Amino acid sequence: MKCFIEPAERIKGRLTAPADKSVSHRAAIFAAMADEPVLITNYLQADDTLSTLAAIEQLGALVERRSEGLMIRGVGLRNAQPPARPIDVGNAGTLIRILPGWLAGQDGSSFELDGDESIRRRPIDRIAEPLRLMGAGVEASEGRFAPFTVAGARLQGIDYAMPVASAQVKSCVALAALCAEGSTTITEPGASRDHSERLLAQAGVKISRQGNQLTIWPTDELTLPERIAIPSDPSSAAFLITAAVLVPSSRLLIEDCSVNWTRSGFIEIARRMGAVIITDLEQQPEDGVIPQHEPLSDIDVTAGPLKPTTVSPHEVPLAVDELPLVALLACFAEGETRIEGAGELRLKESDRIAAVVAALSALGAQVEATEDGVIVNGHGSLRGGQVDAAGDHRIAMLAVVAGLASQEGVEVVGVEAASISYPTFLEDIAALR
Ligand code: S3P
């Protein structure tokens, strides 16, 4: 599907961003692992998170769609049922990397996982390695791609130093640790999103943090709260925030959004570039503290001029999904913006370094790829043109926001990809114009 986005005169109004994709995936998977029913309110109804519901149903969980939310009746920590057909994760990278952590601990059972074309291009060796070290069998296509099989086993706890900061890998190992013998320690090179830790702490799991080192002890069962409320997604909100920063005379209030400190890198970077964003970001907790809930705040955005910046490698995991938006902001600042140490972007739903450079240069920007980042030479405006999202939801939404702020508008090919994480994106944008 194609659509043409006319330049906007302003972005004005208030809205609530959609439910958080990362927390939705985790809440559904963790509820499937629990013995007692869990009611999840505000679950994200998008393609990726619907794949997660289908997956847990295949594993034996019951999902009842009620008016107030989803009632999930799990199968218990060690009782996932091997499905007759492979689990199809669709486009959901988080699902295909986190779920195997649970499956690896199902001693004597095997599970096959597969996904769409994009999933089959994204390596899964980053989870295969620690799961094998713990004792599970992982057989993957060409050694590192989907489709792949996880053979559950009696796992051993390990000390695992992750080569890159990745919340997906950390969460996978943390789930495997629940069924392992002895404790497991995971060391990350830098902080990444911490939703799994928060939920596990709420579920009564013994878990501790020291710096970037997380230790998890095995347990007999997960005792989740009876109700889990999914907060709004700061990554989805970031598209709306960018539109309001870039379109002159805009004023936008995003209500009750998650301001978890491991997700607020984009707001920090945008503010450094001069964006006027008033909100109450969560502060990094003291060492050793694992907060149990997701903090919420309104986010109040006003349009204004921007200056260039350099995004350094340690900031990348805290803004990883929003870096394409930083590149877009940079087109409107005068001078050079650099994003460094972001090689992970090449392994997302598309090669996002190549995709961002292709999209923004098609719109008239001066932008180039480096091996692990992007350099943008901003000129204060963007002409417009055509962008093909090529199945990547964040590139589709980036192109829409670029259209709103451009001089001539943007034709977005494949805009329907937004439904992976934000099905009502175009309606929400229309309501704010
Ligand atoms: C996610 C973690 C990030 C992010 C992805 C969602 C998660 O991936 O890019 O969209 O929910 O854990 P990595 O942790 O692999 O960087």
Image (cartoon, rainbow, N blue to C red):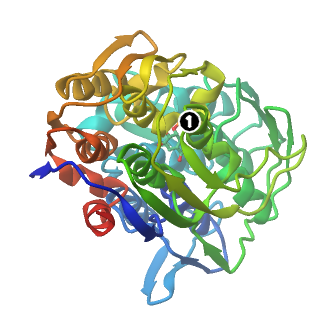
Query: Which residue does the image show at 32% across and 59% down from the upper left?
Result: 47
Please say if 181 is above or below 203: above
Foreground of the two, 223 or 386: 386
Inspect the image, locate mark 1, and give the three-letter code of the amino acid beneath it.
Gly
Residue 90 position within the rendered picture, expressed as x and y whole percent measured from the top left: 30, 50
For residue 145, which quarter of the picture? top left
Query: Which residue does the image show at 79% across and 32% down from the upper left?
Result: 212
Please say if 159 is above or below 277: above
Residue 317 lies left or right of residue 414; in this view the side is right
Foreground of the two, 196 or 289: 289
Residue 207 lies left or right of residue 198; in this view the side is right
Foreground of the two, 194 or 252: 252
Disc 1 within 8 angstroms of ligand 1 (CB): no
Foreground of the two, 213 or 287: 287
Mark 1, secondary structure of its residue:
loop
Residue 315 position within the rendered picture, expressed as x and y whole percent measured from the top left: 63, 28
Label 1, residues with CA under 10 Å away: few <14, some 14-19, many ≥20:
some
Please say if 327 is above or below 156: above
The residue beneath circle 1 is 274
For residue 242, which quarter of the picture? top left
Instruction: Give the total number of marks visible in the rendering.
Output: 1
Query: Which residue extends farthest bottom?
Result: 67
For residue 265, which quarter of the picture? top right
Residue 172 position within the rendered picture, expressed as x and y whole percent measured from the top left: 60, 42
Query: Which residue does the image show at 56% across and 35% down from the upper left?
Result: 274
User: Which quarter of the rendering shows the C terminus?
Assistant: bottom left
Query: Which residue does the image show at 35% across and 47% down from the upper left?
Result: 247
| Residue 152 visible, this orientation | no
Residue 155 position within the rendered picture, expressed as x and y whole percent measured from the top left: 69, 40
Query: Which residue extends farthest front?
Result: 249
| Residue 89 visible, this orientation | yes
